[in-house]
Image: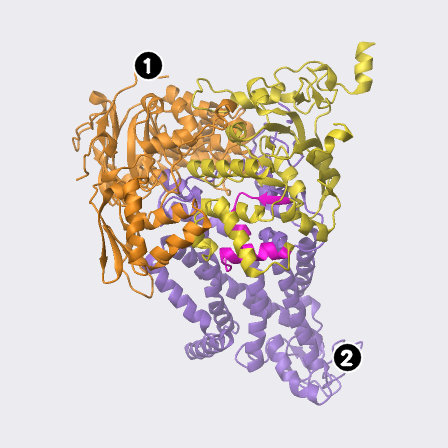
Chain colours: A orange, B yellow, C purple
Amino acid sequence: MITDPPTVDHLSPVQPGVDTTASDGVLLRVRDLHTHFHQRGKLFGGGGSSAVKAVDDVSFDLREGDIFGLIGESGSGKTTLGRTILGLAPATSGSVWWRGINLADINEKRFRPLRRQMGMIFQDPNASLNPAMTIVQGVGHPLQIHGITSNKREIRRRVAEMLERCGLTPAERYLDTYPEDVSGGQKQRVVIARTLITEPELIVADEPVAALDMSVRAKVLELMLDLKDQLGLTYVYITHDLTSGRFVCDQIGIMYLGELVEWGSASAIYDDPKHPYTTSLLEAVPLPDPSRKGRDKQLPVGEIPDALNPPTGCTFHPRCPRAFEPCGWEGEDLVDFFERRWTEVDADTFDRELDATGPLTQVTTDRFVARFKAASPDALIPLLNTLRTSGQDPIFSAVRDIATEGGDVVVRFEDGPAPALQPVAGRMVACHLHGIVPRP
Amino acid sequence: MTTAATNQHVLSVRNLRVAYSTPTGYLHAVDDVSFDLSAGESLGVVGESGCGKSTMGKALMQLLPPGAQMSGSVQLKDDELVGVSRRDLRRIRGEEMALVFQEPMTRLDPLMKISTHFVEAIRAHRPRTSKSAAREMGRKAMAQMGIPPTRADNYPHEFSGGMRQRIMIALGVVMQPSIIVADEPTTALDVIVEAQILDLLDRLRRDEDLGLILITHNLGIVAETCDRVAVMYAGRIVELGPVEEVFTTPKHPYTQGLLRSVISVDTTELASIEGFPPDLQHPPAGCRFAPRCDQVFSDCPVTDPRLTAVTDHTAAACLLYDGAYPPEHREGAHA
Amino acid sequence: MATDTNTSAPLAEPPAQTDPSSSPLTRLRKRLEHALRPWRRANPGARYLVIAGVLITLMFLVMAVFADTVAPFGQDQYCSDEFFNPENGACIGAGPDEQIPNRAAPSRQYPFGTTDTRFDVLSRVILGARIAFAVVAFSTALAMLIGVPLGLFSGYIGGRFDKVMVLVMDSIYAFPSLLLALIIAFALGLRLEQLGIDAPFVPAAVAVGTVYIPQYFRVIRNHTLSVKEEPFVEAARSLGASRTTIVFRYIFFNVVSSIPVLFTLNAADAVLTLAGLGFLGYGIRFPTAEWGLDVNLGLADSVAGFWWTAFWPGVAITLLVTGLSLMGEGLNDIVNPLLRVKGYRGKVKLSARESLKLAGDRDPDAMEAAPHRAGTGEASR
């Protein structure tokens, strides 16, 4: 649907207070955006408060009329990013420039009138409509909120028109019914109608079809694409589903643990992903093609880590099939390595190695060190050295030294910086494989 | 489907019906479903929500809600599951059949260590197994599913969603059953973990020669994991055949529509099936898909098609194929 | 389309009305139908509970409203009508024969007997209903008017305001309710007397009402807390709705459903509290007819063998409380049907919808059981 996929290798300049959309075509500039949620420390046992970095240093441009796909697993922060853009979640720092206004910097009261020009479509249509309002009340409410009209007849007329536009014909049949009277697909159409009734220009759609039955998904997506063309909308399309991204999006951004790890034109990324995480996602997604059956998938190990305690360096490194020395290896990775290794070795090896390391609960770790407190050094040091020289796991490439300290075995690691986004083949990628560019 | 053939099948389902009684009459959520499953074979069951795939899975698992009535026959090796006693059912679950669900956490006791789960599960079937022997069996099952042996004494909440699902599967297969029934086992998981779990299930099936029934709404999962696929619509199987054949040359218009409506990375045009599944309390006469079918003709709204072989391996319930007419109609048509 | 003709069937799609007219009357009918939907879907048991409760309560309500016509005598009338002056309650010139007999056993003339102060028990039971309803209505209205808005805003705004409110309400709640009512009734009664205001039931009603404010507050606040997490509230924010609009148009109508249940159960409790106050002598003052007071007055009689003076007011208390409780329990079943399904044991015919839900095949006309994976696990606050 796009003729000439734009290449992305820089961020456009920001001019606060100036609406440059008409000249450079960029509707939304997200710069160094952070959204952190603070968790209280425990009631007893002290400890300071810790923060979940739901969105961590995200920057991208969204051009007017484009569909920007935010793709990631659950916990990747994609929904929070969408909510932060619309001021529904508070930004910790950074900016969201829209027509010269920094949306991340204005309070709810100042934001309210702007909401007429931007809207959100939610994942679960069953929950995003007020069950106590009829469809005409619910869809027409934004007209009253923004003082566009309060004439009942006029509201009815406009709502009916928008419902028909969203494929709910004849609208009269739906106007006075309640959300529970219509099907899931129809509800999502009602939600879309409600979002569009104030004629916004920017829509954040959070998994708009994920909750729908598969035979309905295509219809709702088609409606969204048609409406975009008719009304000149710009979308942020949030999804975990890679399959729809290519068809729907002009640009996509792949998110992992709150960070944007790759963004660029959809076709470029799908044809030739440059970040190992993107590759893994494309590798893992099941397609209705039996010829892919039994293929050897290069899957990342483990699962997305706890956002409260994310890995250092590149946050994807513990799972990355292509991780190497500078990726930010830390003490905890060594514990994970042994756990993983022991699911593969036989029982005797396991028993022998467990004797060497001692219980893994007795291992203390921090950014650069793993300290085996209950180890038998005579057994563990040779074991570690063998593993190090065998080169079977990249973690050992980052080991600086292995030593005994007062009966403990201590493994130290080299420093590894977090990768910054850098231009690679017409898109931005945050990965050391393409040259080590540390994040400031 | 001769009697000789059924002997090789580990599971034979014949004319399975599940009905719920409602104030206004009976509702057949599953209506006359028959299929076989061989050892080491994986069968995918797909369809829209409300097509009866989940109810059928629950019927196989004997987990139907109170008020549901089941008829027909479900033969699992030497046991008939329809009308089975509670006592036999306890034995069959575990020793013959493993169940895997969408949300594993609800099936694990939060106050019990993982190793204790295994000991309990094993001793429920073999009361005289010593604790250490049971733990050893558990360890093997865990290793098979890639669960670190060092975590055996952790509690369920200390594991991630994918690990819990692995634990559930390991618990299910520790007694070496003949089949696994998995109802949307990866729906709650992310795509990478989903792929990991499906790989494990697939490996388990090959290594242990297990029969696998995989109920899912995701056609991609079926295509990549299963040998055969049953497409369900309005409580019935409308197409049943090898995955390769059904996905490349679907016979039933519903399967064709379903495959068209899937959005994939190479999708260039969106398509969908018009209309909605019928109300199962008042299913349309004749073919249940007729009101939505793009190849409907005059016989469809009046004649109810039977599932019939249309190629050597694939069966479809559609009047486009001659054998789908009930016997009396066919004679009439040919007369 | 396939099933447009099947609008009555529960699974038909789409069940939207085919009636194209949109006169205000039709709209009103549709909204009424919507409001009554939980009632129609409720199981018969719950409906019978409510019906029984409503019948009993209605009986008392009729008694209360038409008390003056129904009751054979006035509340403090101790002689036959011709000698009685309703203005000052005096019986001028009534000889012993014209006076109502003292402690007469139930008879045709005095079906419930008479008291030692020569009052007709039946009349006092009937007139007592009036006081009971007046106090219940006044006190629950007071509790609702204060408790509901406080609960709504406390729940929605949260933060420090919420913490303070919860603390205050919990302190009130933790106080033994009868003792609290007693203190308020006593203090307020004294004050009104000093000011020379004659409002016999106000102290009792305020006392009873105050006791229930925390209940409305807690229920509404907790319900608000859960409703405000619903996506439609965030949706309302994304549409630009102000806080007040969200609270009253999006949250309020979704939490009101818990009010009727609380109202009926509180009303039952209020009848008891009022009676308790009366019994202890701090509620309604003699000679106004009030059941608790009458039970107290009759207590000495019953020890002496005159059972009827305390018995009938006692029966009235029990019956009205039972009626209101039945209504409350039934309504609770209707408003929160989930509890019913969860608590289910034994053989009951489930409705089709419930059966399907239990079976995991969601309503075909609702949504697909599709991936809830994304979004849900997104960094929690």
Q: Is residue B191 left or right of residue C266?
A: left
Q: Is residue B100 magenta?
A: yes
Picture residue at 32% right of the left edge, 26% below the top: A273
Instruction: For residue B91, say whether it is visible.
Output: yes
Output the chain of dot 2. Answer: C
Q: Which residue is mark 2?
A: C106
The percent coordinates of residue B5 (x first, y second) are: 73, 29
Where residue C160 sits, quadrant-wise, is bottom left
Identify the disc placed on residue B49.
none
SS at mark 1? loop
**Quadrant location of residue A379?**
bottom left
Taking the image as drawn, is residue B30 in sight?
no
Q: Nearer the viewer, residue C186 or B293?
A: B293
Q: Secondary structure at mark 2?
A: loop
Quarter holding residue A99 = top left
Q: Is residue A8 above or below residue C72?
A: above
- Closest to the camera, between mark 1 and mark 2, is 1
Residue placed furthest toward the bottom = C304
Few, some or many residues within 10 Å of mark 1 (<14, 14–19, 20+): few
Q: Is residue B215 above or below residue C149?
A: above
Distance in Å between CA atoms under marks 1 and 2: 99 Å
Q: Tell me the quadrant of the picture where the N terminus of chain A can be found.
A: top left
Q: Position of residue B82 (x, y in %)?
A: 74, 43
Was residue C377 drawn as part of the magenta stretch in this picture? Answer: no
Q: Amino acid at mark 1?
A: Thr
Depth order, front residue of A170/A387: A387
Name the spot of residue C89 as percent of width and height, x first: 62, 79
The residue labelled by disc 1 is A3
Q: Is residue C85 above or below residue B314?
A: below
Which segment is the magenta one?
Answer: B97-124
- Label 1 is found on which chain of the structure? A
B228 vs C39, nearest the viewer: B228
